[in-house]
């Protein structure tokens, strides 16, 4: 960023000093109009006001994106009649840089919607996309086409991205290639790459951006997610790969995340609010992972507004829910035109120094991730570059040269209408993924943080799921409830349909009355679409105490105590974003999901069932528009403690149950839901039996019980699934905390042909 730009911002702030308090510094409104678009002003025509031009989709403002009302009553830059301010078609970088091949059609410029095709000369082989389209964000679809020979080079030809030129044609170990972009664009990514012994190129593939080029939410999700997720999952391996790092924190390590959000007047209030919401979403998503970070969160302009102090988190004074609450409650209010970008990095450095004093020699086990949302404009405090260098020195000094970059990542999200890219790109740090992003649609950015949980490194974590506002389609349903299973069994020629939940890649948990305990060949499970979604049962394990006729001598016709079974699948399922296990009680993994450390099984129960009126959910079957079986969520309240008897007494009269035999039929192994008071619960339908009764913690789902039986037949699957309880209807669910020994006896069994779950000792 040039000195004149910084000076202009300072001049705007000094108007009152030069011209006297109360004097208006209005800028002229003439010559501001734009062909094909419009503009908005942050503070009318007064000093410091930012003018922002807006164009329809597929167009961008030219020649100016923004103008600033300066202290001398003039705009920077000055509006001119020639060239006239107008909306231009989005342009993509010149693709005619392909080596050893041709590009068609040949054009001087390529605009949004233009399609190009690529063909290699004889003797050369194509890698990348043979056809590409110029997109609305100023980028080409697909990947860079490369024409190369199988020449035996140690590294593959890295190609040349559109709009760039490359120096370097040798691709052996330690050979270097260098990239530059033409004068109308700037380079994002690695300007220099080195052929490594592994056969991969160092750094990241470069790209040439125009000022109107932006990263799509999908690109941000893939690049940012793949990088930061390596900090959020504890792994034993220390292998690195080209796509992303496999370890960034040891089992004894600590992750500190520092977040800064620019709220100065150069950033519109809409951008500020959406940045804040994106941070909330990011923290919510991070809470899904194995590592529990410490947070320092600052909003800044010329001053700092500390939302969360990382030392308070380290001292246990602030918990994760408090962090989100503080963020959501923050109101932007009046803002000034001053921006001190350096002050936020100085604050981060200060907190690192205090953490270092506390941690002593253990500071070397701390990893640090800095995430800053800003446009890069500053008029106070000087350049942040020297402070960033101090941060690097502090983190790197305790690390071996080969691994020091693993301990510091600085991510910059360029937001706003006029982004100072060169200054911001110089502030990034870290390896294993892109660290600089130009973001236009912050609302969609929030959605992309959900997709961070798609990657292979974390998809096997129990209870992990994506949050979606709707579950109306099969695709979204499977991502929201990836542990959901449809269970079918045959009896006397009739099919019985129930629900179940995947608890390991090879086992589905369901109700015993839904399956044939000794005839696995009669049982099948559906975990996905099509033929591959159906799994045959290899074995069925029912609780040894389950006996539906056990209380016939007391007049109880059907007795459902211990109504729980495990189906061992003939072939284990492939874990993906649409199929993965739910967390179940008293396992080490569930402790990790609930962030309980090394606490006991009783600690889980106290946390999950802490209230005498606990809010829970289960699923019901229905059909989508394509007539496929899907599910909807039901909301219920477990009546516990003093509320329990009032709930269970409605079982009197069902299947011969009397007041005298009530507690024989509805044992302490059951959780009771339903009724109208104090809330009107949903009620289970035919086909819901065996399904998980669960509780969500951010992106993790913990199964607490399973649907067993009910007092009234209020609805059926043909009714569309969602039915509310009446005053007398009740549902009874097997409490999994009461059957842990059975679960452990099967799922925790050692020396079997399947991987056991690790259960807590107490």
Image: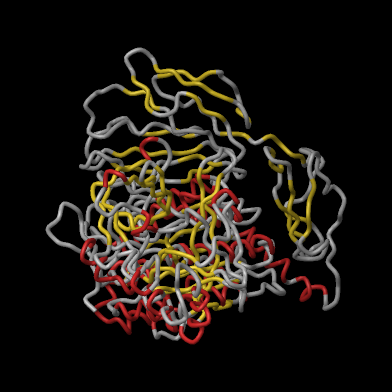
User: Where residue 179 appears, x then y in whole percent?
Assistant: 42, 38
Quarter assignment of residue 251:
bottom left
Placement of the C terminus among the 4 image quadrants: bottom left
Q: Nearer the viewer, residue 402 or 735?
A: 735
Residue that lies at the very extreme toward the top in this rendered image: 122
Tell me what residue is drawn at x 43 percent, y 67 percent.
287
* Up-down relation of residue 759 to residue 77 (above or below): below
User: Where residue 545 appears, x then y in whole percent?
Assistant: 26, 68
* Up-down relation of residue 499 to residue 383 (above or below): above
Quarter assignment of residue 404:
bottom left
Quarter assignment of residue 469:
bottom right
In the displayed structure image, the side of residue 466 where residue 562 appears, left or right: left
**Is any atom of residue 521 visible in this view?**
yes
User: Where residue 612 appears, x then y in whole percent?
Assistant: 49, 82
How many labels sit on residues?
0
**Is any atom of residue 697 visible in this view?**
no
* Up-down relation of residue 390 to residue 722 (above or below): below
* Up-down relation of residue 161 to residue 575 (above or below): above
Q: Nearer the viewer, residue 451 or 634?
A: 634
Q: Nearer the viewer, residue 351 or 309?
A: 309
User: Where residue 455 appears, x then y in whole percent?
Assistant: 38, 50
């Amino acid at each position: 960023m040039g000195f004149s730009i910084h000076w202009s911002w300072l001049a705007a702030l000094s108007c009152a000093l030069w011209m006297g308090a109360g004097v208006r510094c209005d800028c002229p409104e003439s010559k501001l109009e734009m062909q094909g678009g419009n503009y908005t002003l942050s503070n009318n025509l007064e000093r410091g006001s930012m003018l922002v031009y807006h164009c329809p989709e597929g167009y961008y403002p030219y020649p100016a994106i923004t103008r600033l009302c300066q202290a001398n009553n003039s705009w920077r830059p000055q509006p001119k009649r020639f060239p006239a301010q107008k909306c231009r078609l989005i342009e993509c970088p010149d693709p005619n840089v392909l080596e050893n091949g041709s590009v068609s059609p040949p054009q001087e410029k390529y605009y949004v919607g233009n399609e190009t095709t690529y063909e290699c000369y004889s003797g050369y082989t194509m890698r990348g996309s043979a056809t590409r389209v110029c997109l609305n964000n100023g980028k080409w679809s697909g990947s860079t086409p490369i024409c190369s020979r199988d020449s035996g080079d140690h590294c593959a030809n890295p190609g040349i991205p559109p709009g760039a030129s490359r120096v370097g044609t040798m691709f052996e170990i330690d050979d270097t290639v260098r990239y530059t972009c033409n004068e109308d664009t700037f380079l994002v990514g690695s300007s220099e790459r080195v052929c490594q012994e592994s056969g991969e190129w160092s750094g990241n593939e470069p790209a040439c951006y125009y000022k109107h080029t932006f990263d799509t939410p999908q690109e941000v999700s893939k690049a940012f997610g793949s990088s930061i997720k390596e900090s959020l999952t504890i792994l034993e391996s220390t292998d690195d790969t080209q796509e992303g790092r496999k370890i960034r924190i040891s089992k004894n390590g600590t992750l500190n995340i520092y977040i800064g959000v620019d709220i100065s007047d150069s950033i519109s209030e809409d951008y500020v609010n959406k940045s804040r919401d994106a941070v909330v979403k990011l923290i919510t998503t991070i809470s899904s992972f194995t590592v529990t970070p410490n947070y320092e969160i600052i909003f800044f302009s010329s001053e700092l507004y500390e939302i969360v102090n990382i030392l308070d988190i380290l001292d246990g004074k602030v918990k994760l829910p408090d962090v989100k609450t503080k963020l959501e409650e923050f109101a932007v209010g009046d803002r000034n035109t001053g921006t001190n970008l350096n002050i936020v990095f100085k604050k981060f450095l200060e907190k690192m120094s205090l953490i270092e004093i506390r941690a002593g020699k253990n500071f070397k086990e701390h990893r640090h991730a800095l995430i800053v949302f800003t446009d890069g404009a500053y008029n106070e405090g000087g350049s942040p570059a020297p402070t960033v260098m101090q941060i690097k020195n502090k983190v790197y000094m305790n690390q071996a040269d080969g691994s020091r970059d693993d301990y510091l990542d600085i991510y910059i999200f360029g937001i706003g209408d006029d982004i100072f890219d060169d200054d911001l790109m110089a502030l990034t740090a870290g390896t294993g993924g892109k660290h600089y992003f130009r973001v236009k649609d912050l609302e969609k950015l929030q959605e992309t943080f959900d997709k961070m949980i798609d990657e292979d490194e974390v998809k096997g974590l129990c209870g992990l799921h994506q949050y979606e506002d709707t579950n109306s389609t099969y695709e979204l349903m499977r991502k929201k409830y990836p542990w959901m299973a449809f269970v079918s069994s045959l009896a006397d020629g009739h099919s019985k349909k129930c629900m179940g939940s995947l608890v390991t890649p090879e086992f589905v948990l369901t109700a015993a009355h839904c399956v044939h305990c000794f005839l696995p060949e009669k049982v099948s499970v559906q975990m996905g679409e099509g033929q591959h979604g159906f799994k045959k049962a290899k074995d069925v394990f029912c609780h040894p105490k389950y006996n539906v006729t056990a209380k016939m001598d007391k007049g109880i016709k059907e007795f459902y105590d211990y109504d729980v079974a495990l189906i061992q699948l003939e072939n284990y399922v492939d874990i993906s974003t649409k199929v993965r296990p739910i967390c179940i009680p008293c396992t080490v993994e569930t402790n990790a999901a609930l962030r309980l450390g090394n606490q006991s099984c009783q600690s889980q129960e106290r946390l999950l069932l802490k209230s005498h009126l606990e809010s829970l959910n289960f699923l019901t079957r229905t059909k989508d528009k394509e007539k496929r079986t899907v599910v909807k969520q039901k909301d219920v309240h477990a009546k516990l403690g003093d509320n329990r008897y009032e709930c269970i007494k409605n079982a009197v009269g069902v299947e011969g149950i009397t007041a005298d035999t009530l507690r024989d039929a509805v044992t302490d192994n059951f959780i009771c839901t339903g009724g109208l008071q104090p809330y009107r619960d949903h009620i289970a339908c035919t086909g819901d039996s065996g399904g998980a009764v669960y509780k969500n913690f951010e992106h993790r789902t913990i199964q607490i019980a399973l649907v067993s039986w009910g007092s009234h037949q209020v609805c059926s699957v043909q009714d569309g699934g969602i039915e509310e309880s009446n005053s007398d209807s009740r549902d009874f669910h097997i409490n999994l905390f009461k059957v842990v020994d059975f679960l452990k006896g099967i799922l925790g069994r050692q020396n079997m042909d399947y991987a056991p779950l690790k259960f807590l000792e107490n």
